[in-house]
Image (tube, rainbow, N blue to C red):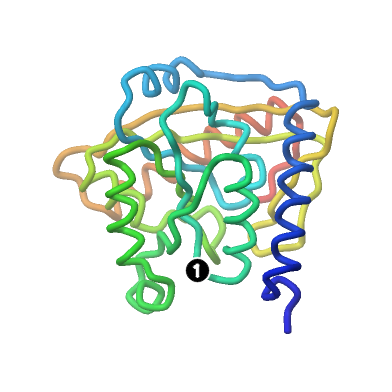
Amino acid sequence: MRPLRNPLIQGVLAWLLAGWMRFCFATIRWTHRNEGVAETVWANGGGVLCTFWHSRIGLSPACWPLDRAQPAKALISLSPDGQFIARAVALQGIPAVRGSSANKDKADRAKGGSQALRDGLRQLKLGALAITPDGPRGPAGQMAEGLPLMAKLSKAPVLFIGLSCKPAIRLNSWDRAILPLPFGRGAIVWDVATYPEGAGLADVALAWTERLNAVEAEADAITGLEPSR
C-alpha cells in the first residue's frame, strides 16, 4: 500500500507540510506586482476564479489574504495524492472542492468532474474558487477547458496568478512542482480577465494559457528561478 493512501500518514504529512509552508511564507521577502487588479476584485466581492499552474500549488496559499479576500475553496482531484494536498491546503484556511478541471469524458467520469463543476459553480456564488487548469496529471502548462467553461457559465472574473520563489525544492514530478524554502525571495504577479462573449472554449483556453504563462514567467524573472518548461 502506498504511504499516502494511509489516512494516518496522510494526516501527519499534511500537517507537517502546512506548517512548513506557513513558516516559509512568513520568512520569504515577497514582491507583489500588479496587485491592484486583485485588490479591485477583492473589494468588489462576489465570485472569482483564481488560477495558477499545478507546479505552483505549493505556493498558492501565499497569494490569498484571508482577512480581506473572498472565502476561497480549491478544486483538487479525487486521487489519493489529491486528498493529501487537499488536507494541507485546508489547514491553511482553504478547503477543497473535490474533482478535476479536466474536460475529457473518461477523466470526467473517473474523477468526479461533473459533480466538481456543479460544486464549483455553487462555490462561485459565495466566493473564490482556485483551479490548476493543467491538473491533475497534465500535460504541464496546457490548459483544459474546465476553467473557461466555469468562467463562461458563472460570468465570474478570472485572476491569473504567477507564483515563484527562490531557493526552492524542485520535485521530480510530472509538473516539476516547487516547494518553498525559507528566507528566500518570492514573487506574486496578477492579471485579470473575463470570458469574452461569443468566443469558443478552445480559443479561450489557448489565449488564457499565454496569459498564465506570462505572469508565471514574470514572477520567475523577479526571483531568478529557472523555469521548468
Residue at image x 76%, y 58%? 13
Quadrant holding the N terminus? bottom right
Quadrant of residue 40 in the image?
A: top left
Which residue ends up furthest to the front in the rendered image? 8
In the image, 218 versus 62, the foreground residue is: 62
Locate residue 71 relative to residue 27 in the image: left or right.
Answer: left
The residue positioned 43% from the left and 55% from the top of the image is 97
Q: Residues within 10 Å of mark 1 (few under 14, many from 20)?
A: some
Left/right placement of residue 227 relative to residue 100 reads: right
User: Badge 1 is on which residue?
Assistant: 78
Q: Position of residue 207 (x, y in %)?
A: 36, 43
Q: How many marks?
A: 1
SS type, badge 1: loop
Under mark 1, the amino acid is Leu
In the depicted structure, whether residue 69 falls above or below residue 168: above
Looking at the picture, does residue 67 appear above or below residue 22? above
